[in-house]
Amino acid sequence: MKMDNDQHRIVAEAQANQLSEKESKYRRAKIWQMGFFAANNTATNIFMFLMMNVAYFATGPIGLGTVVVSTLITGSRIFDGITDPIIGLWIDKTDGKYGKFRPFMVLGYVVMTVAVLLIFFTNQHAPESLRLVYFILLYMLYIIGYTFQTAVTKSGQSVITTDPSQRPLFSTFDITLTSILFAAAPIYLSSYLVPKYGGFTANTEALFHEFALTFIAISGVFTLLAIIGIWSSDISENFGTGQTVKITFKDMIAILKRNRALQMLIVAASTDKLGQQVATNSIVMVVIFGVIIGDFSLYGTLAGIMMIPNIILVLFGTGFAAKFGTKKGYIVSTWLAMFAFTTMFLLLWLGEPSQIRLGNWNFMTIAFLVAYVFGTGVRTLSGGLVIPMIPDVTDYETYLTGRYAPGVMGTIFSFVDKMISSLAQTLIGVLLAVIGFREVFPDVDTPYSDSLFWVGVFLFIGTLMIAWIISLVAMKFYPLSKDKMKEVQDELQKRREENLASK
């Protein structure tokens, strides 16, 4: 028996040593570093949620028309996409005392804060003839700051960890924080701000003053946490293979033409982003919950209810992605989201939406609640798994060509992503204008109509279904499976060791 125990011990030690040797090939982050850095995306999402509601302020105190505002936001996002490659090159050329990424996190937060304060506190007091131009300039300033900080979310992961099995952990923290944000923010908006100020249109200035100041402060805390999380990793030794390779605009074109993984990820993620920006827009939420269902406060209540289920789905989904690969996790979560949103469509179309009330536990309420909570959870999981795929694509480019260009890779991705997703506000504005909402958007007091039902359901469900079909086709041609990423990281580690030895 003693011999058997010794043999078991020797085998166990050998397996542990083998696992330790396998893990030592990769640069791994501490758990808290992954969690803190994920707060960078939450910091920018806080600003994004605030600015998703800017149309109400622009058409109210500033006095701009609905179609004008929608078109301006679209044009500004196109400008945002054009500036992305410039900012990406700037990030890749930066390697100073404070690293490559931290300066852009600070700069992004400061620029967004200044732009938002000027929009909500000064734009409405400008001369009427100048308000439109002033709004355009301030909105452009905001999206430049937004790009500074979001570019780091996409590119900074490449220095945090090189372990393919650890990268989905970023999504665990990111989606958990995002779920908490998008659970708390709608409650804050629909159950606190809107009742306090009598709706979006009764006392718009005061509502948005409190809205902006609160969200700016919260975003600042998350930005600080993210800077702390990446601090020790943001050093020259962790940039690619340790060998500097100059990147130019010409290289950016070559990367986009050659890198199939980048191409397919752009197609999948940008269409998903368009669908999600349309479906989660505050105007669409007002139509679905305030008009079709007839209880806008339900929107905020459901956001709170689904926080815990969302986190459970995230833990399960990112664990699945860590085991079977991020690509596989993305595909499975997309199929599940399609099933859930198809169920919601059938309930809203064939059932009686006005019966959906938390105090009335009938079939409609239970079925819609389950489909909405599950569907929103897997939709969030699907979108969140895209982010750790970006450093995979970055490392794949280094593997193919030797070029380490996290800023360029992230902003090439953002450029195309924003070109497509910028259509969201215009699509909403045009479709609503077609059915009569040319001067103001639907509010919680807008009467129900069949035309508003079909436009609302298409914006809430139809755009997502189209996007997911395109994404699943793109994933058929995405080459970075879990096994392929292990091959990529093994080769990059070999090159790092060779470059270190040569120095």
Image (tube, rainbow, N blue to C red):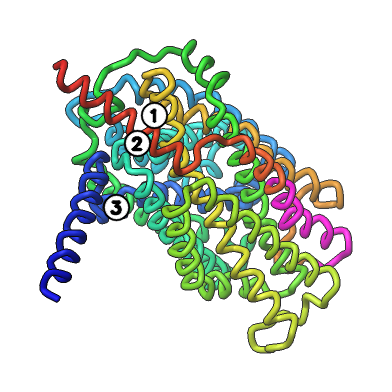
Q: Amino acid at mark 3?
A: Phe
Q: Earlier in the sequence, mark 3 or mark 1?
A: 3
Q: Earlier in the sequence, mark 1 or mark 2?
A: 2
Q: Secondary structure at mark 3?
A: helix
Percent coordinates x, y for residue 415 in the rendering: 55, 29
Q: Quadrant of the C terminus?
A: top left
Q: Please report the residue visible at 30 percent of the width from the left and 38 percent of the height from the top.
A: 106
Q: Is residue 351 above or below residue 134?
A: below
Assess disc 2: are there few (<14), some (14-19) or many (≥20) residues with their C-alpha within 10 Å of its C-alpha.
Answer: many
Assess disc 3: are there few (<14), some (14-19) or many (≥20) residues with their C-alpha within 10 Å of its C-alpha.
Answer: many
Q: Please report the residue visible at 41 percent of the width from the left and 36 percent of the height from the top.
A: 391
Q: Nearer the viewer, mark 2 or mark 3?
A: 2
Q: Please report the residue visible at 45 percent of the width from the left and 67 percent of the height from the top.
A: 311
Q: How many tags in the picture?
A: 3
Q: Secondary structure at mark 1?
A: helix
Residues in magenta, as a range? 447-467
Residue identified by numbered label 2: 158
Q: Amino acid at mark 2?
A: Ser
